[in-house]
Structure formats: structure tokens, C-alpha cells
Image: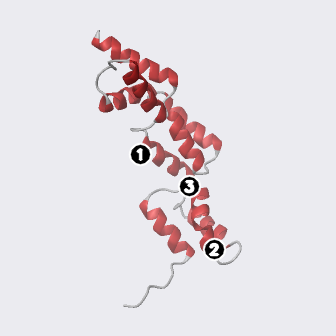
Amino acid sequence: MGPRPPLSLKGRALRLLSGREYARAELERKLAPHEEAPGQLRRVLDDLQAKGFIDDQRAADSVVHRRSGKLGAMRIRQELQGKGLAEDLVRQAVAGLQATEFERACEIWERRFGEPAADAAARAKQVRFLVSRGFSGEVVARVLKRARVAVD
């Protein structure tokens, strides 16, 4: 067998979309280097969007679903913004996470640490871990306070 012919722009887009949901802006960035004629990429993406292959709402929901078990709302907001999603879509997706933020942070803390910090250094490590995962300082404080109360 000889070398395969290069994939068309539409073929590349479909290959990417077969793996996971992509926002339109994200696909534009990935496929721009492969555009051979001006306007070609826009036409391909318009066609795929009209056929339902590209849906920014679905892409946002996918990120929230995949990442909410490990990350806080602030970090997920950052990821959604990085994908080029509209601000109102990002705001809507993150608003749904706010209601479960404390519970999710508790679960993540429990999986990682499982017991209250023995000293200030261990406490600082736990705080850094949760903050790096995108949880607010208020939520982190509530999680650590709950852990201390549970032991007392």
C-alpha cells in the first residue's frame, strides 16, 4: 500500500469530532493551517454546523461533564473560555456548577487527603491543592473546616 492521500478539510474536522465535542472556534484554530483557499474553512464549518456536527452548547456540556469531577468552577470557566465559547454560554455552564461546588470539593479532598491536616504545612498543601483545582477560597475554607469538625 502506498501513502494515503491527504485528508480534506472536512475529513480532518470529522476526524477531530469523532473523538470528542469541539467548539467552532476551537476547530477553526486547529484547522486553519490546513486551509488551502480563503473562505474554505468557514464554508466547511458552516456546513458541519448546519448538519449538527458542531454545537457549542454540546461542547460546553461535554467539558462540564468530563471535568466537574476533578475541577472547580473557576478552572472549568477558564477551560471553556479557552475553547472560544461565547461568554453567556460559559456563564450559563458555570452557574450550574456553583450549586454543587462544595460537595464536589469535599469529594475531591476526601479522595486526595481523607484526613485533616496535622500541621500548618499540611494544611497549606491541602489549600494549594484545592485552589489549583479551581475552587474558591471560601469553598476551600468550608471544606477544611468541615474536615476538622468531623474529627472533633
Callout 1 amino acid: Arg
Circle 1: element type: helix
> For residue 150, what is the image quadrant?
top left
Residue under the point 51% across and 34% down: 73
Q: Tell me the quarter of the image containing the N terminus.
A: bottom left
Gap between marks 2 and 1 measured at Cα: 30 Å
Residue on which the image places disc 3: 23
Seen from this angle, which residue lies furthest right? 38
Q: Position of residue 8 (x, y in %)?
A: 54, 78
> For residue 149, what is the image quadrant?
top left
Q: Earlier in the sequence, mark 1 or mark 3?
A: 3
Badge nearest the viewer, 2 or 3: 2
Callout 3 amino acid: Ala
Who is closer to the viewer here, 120 or 33?
120
Callout 2 amino acid: Glu
Who is closer to the viewer here, 57 or 109?
109
Residue under the point 29% across and 26% down: 114
From what the image shows, is residue 71 above or below residue 148?
below
Residue on which the image places disc 1: 66
Q: Earlier in the sequence, mark 2 or mark 1?
A: 2
Who is closer to the viewer here, 53 or 24?
24
From what the image shows, is residue 152 above or below residue 1?
above
Gap between marks 2 and 3 measured at Cα: 18 Å
Residue under the point 39% across and 30% down: 104
